[in-house]
């Protein structure tokens, strides 16, 4: 049934028409399956395991959408036979009460009631749900791709850290006034003394060079000092590490969690007549993404202010101190959830607009005037641009300032060995086993020892890991060196990296 009109059943349909429809649907399905298969194989050949896992999640989401559509199709007749009182069925409409063509065939009319939902309305709903899933996936992929495209410009900054000029300027034996360093000067202003003015300044700073060269260089230096031993610091490829870490994050972004589905249901409710949702709903994700961008800038500024407050003189390059306490609720991952939420809500707005435009035209019950159309389309473009070129690259950099170092820096074998060592160490500590002999190396069997063995013996690790870690200083000349003698937080780098 479509719009209340009786249609031909399969009994009255030519068999050749059924065969043609089946053939076309099967051909399209096989083509899509082969496309995913070849794309997955390409990602594996290029050692993009995180992106391959993201592709698998996309396939799972599409399969879930197909299952939801199947359930809606199976139960649409059952749901359409549910009758509710007219006072309930005539409430919360998207527009003024209008004549519904399905009322002609309404099975509840004889009972003095109305249908809970018509079969045709349910059919339209499951088409929209599938369109929403596809739009969300496309939005996530394009946002990630455009963000990575912008982050390519950081390669020049990364290469500069390998030059002699950089080594001379960041001589660890050189003393300077903290106020004379470029990073402190950039983030030391009179308005930073007030939290309100600080947030205002950081809010606007995200629009004008959200990631400055001095910020990248300084945060990179703070990261390697906090997480890497001295012999691995000079040639570490921080830009590649950020790229790999972002690929890990995109696995979560492409997934539509139950929380996001709940917000999708709530968004449907806002289309009620008289709520004027087009005047405020599209601005919620815009507000969130702007606040996230401002918070990321506040984190960088606070790190600069801490350097100035720690002393008048700095030795070598200014060193920022990473820590989860810089982020909301001590959770750097909360930033990713907000970005995920913004992308989904933006995808919902765009998918709903084009779906309603296709089904009902413009103007319609869902889009009554030009202002509604202009707001939804402009917000879709603006939010997409902010996520891609402003917030996502800024997040990719600042997110590394947490207390933990992501395991993408290691190959699969090393990451697995480190986790096993950590579990074994916890077991020995709990049960009082494994006392070390006087002649045993203090780090034998530890992540540092494993990493040294891996760098000396392994020749079949991933290309991406080669760029990030194997080229970051080669084998350690002192594989059993006691890192507890090192100054600063680098001594705990390996323990931090596996949290």
Image (cartoon, rainbow, N blue to C red):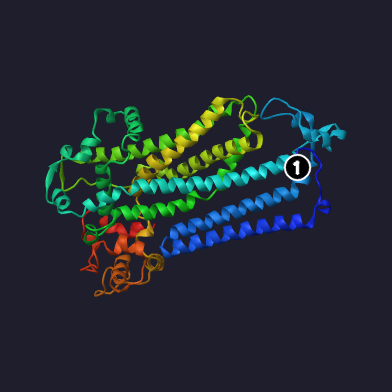
* Residue 459 seen: yes
**Measured along the vertical axis of the image, is residue 148 above or below residue 471?**
above
Q: Locate the N terminus by quadrant.
A: top right
Q: Quadrant of residue 307?
A: top left
**Measured along the vertical axis of the image, is residue 159 above or below residue 430?**
above
Q: Residues within 10 Å of mark 1 (few under 14, many from 20)?
A: many
Q: Quadrant of residue 437?
A: bottom left
Name the residue: 48% across, 51% down: 252
* Residue 320 seen: no
Viewer-proximal residue among 47 and 114: 47
The percent coordinates of residue 353 (x first, y second) are: 58, 36
Residue 273 shown left or right of residue 212 in the figure: right
Q: Locate the C terminus by quadrant.
A: bottom left
The percent coordinates of residue 493 (x first, y second) are: 30, 58
Viewer-proximal residue among 238 and 7: 7
The percent coordinates of residue 253 (x first, y second) are: 48, 49
Q: Farthest right residue?
A: 110
Count of residue discs = 1
Name the residue: 45% across, 39% down: 384
Name the residue: 40% across, 65% down: 419
The percent coordinates of residue 243 (x first, y second) are: 36, 53
Viewer-proximal residue among 29 and 147: 29
Residue 73 shown left or right of residue 344 in the figure: right
Callout 1 secondary element: helix
What residue is shown with label 1? 119
Residue 72 shown left or right of residue 183 in the figure: right
């Amino acid at each position: 049934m479509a719009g209340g009109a009786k249609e031909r059943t399969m009994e009255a349909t030519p068999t050749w028409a059924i065969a043609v429809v089946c053939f076309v649907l099967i051909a399209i399905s096989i083509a899509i399956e082969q496309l995913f298969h070849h794309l997955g194989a390409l990602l594996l050949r290029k050692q993009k395991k995180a992106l391959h896992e993201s592709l698998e999640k996309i396939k799972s989401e599409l399969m879930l959408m197909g299952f939801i559509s199947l359930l809606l199709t199976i139960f649409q007749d059952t749901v359409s036979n549910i009758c509710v009182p007219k006072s309930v069925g005539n409430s919360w409409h998207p527009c003024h009460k209008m004549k519904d063509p399905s009322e002609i065939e309404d099975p509840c009319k004889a009972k003095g009631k109305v249908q809970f939902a018509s079969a045709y309305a349910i059919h339209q709903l499951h088409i929209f749900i599938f369109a929403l899933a596809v739009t969300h996936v496309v939005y996530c992929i394009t946002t990630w791709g455009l963000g990575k495209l912008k982050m390519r410009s950081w390669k020049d900054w990364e290469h500069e850290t390998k030059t002699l000029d950089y080594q001379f300027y960041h001589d660890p034996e050189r003393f300077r006034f903290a106020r004379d360093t470029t990073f402190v000067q950039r983030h030391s202003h009179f308005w930073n003394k007030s939290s309100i003015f600080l947030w205002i300044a950081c809010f606007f700073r995200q629009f004008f060079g959200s990631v400055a060269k001095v910020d990248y260089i300084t945060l990179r230096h703070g990261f390697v000092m906090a997480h890497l031993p001295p012999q691995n610091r000079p040639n570490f490829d921080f830009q590649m590490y950020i790229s790999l870490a972002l690929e890990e994050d995109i696995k979560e972004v492409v997934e539509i969690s139950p929380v996001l589905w709940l917000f999708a249901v709530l968004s449907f409710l806002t289309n009620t007549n008289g709520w004027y949702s087009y005047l405020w709903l599209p601005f919620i994700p815009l507000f969130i993404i702007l606040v996230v961008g401002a918070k990321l800038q506040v984190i960088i500024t606070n790190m600069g202010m801490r350097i100035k407050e720690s002393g008048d003189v700095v030795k070598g390059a200014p060193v920022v101190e990473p820590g989860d306490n810089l982020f909301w609720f001590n959770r750097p991952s909360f930033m990713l959830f907000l970005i995920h939420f913004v992308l989904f809500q933006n995808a919902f707005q765009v998918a709903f607009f084009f779906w309603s435009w296709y089904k009902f035209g413009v103007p319609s019950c869902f889009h009554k005037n030009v202002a509604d159309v202009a707001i939804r389309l402009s917000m879709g473009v603006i939010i997409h641009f902010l996520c891609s070129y402003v917030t996502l690259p800024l997040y990719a950099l600042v997110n590394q300032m947490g207390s933990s170092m992501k395991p993408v820096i290691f190959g699969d074998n090393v990451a697995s060995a480190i986790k096993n060592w950590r579990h074994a160490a916890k077991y020995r500590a709990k049960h009082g086993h494994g006392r070390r002999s006087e002649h045993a190396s203090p780090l034998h069997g530890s992540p540092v020892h494993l990493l040294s063995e891996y760098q000396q013996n392994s020749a079949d690790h991933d290309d991406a890991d080669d760029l990030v870690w194997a080229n970051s200083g080669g084998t350690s000349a002192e594989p059993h060196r006691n890192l507890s003698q090192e100054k600063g937080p680098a001594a705990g780098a390996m323990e931090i990296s596996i949290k």
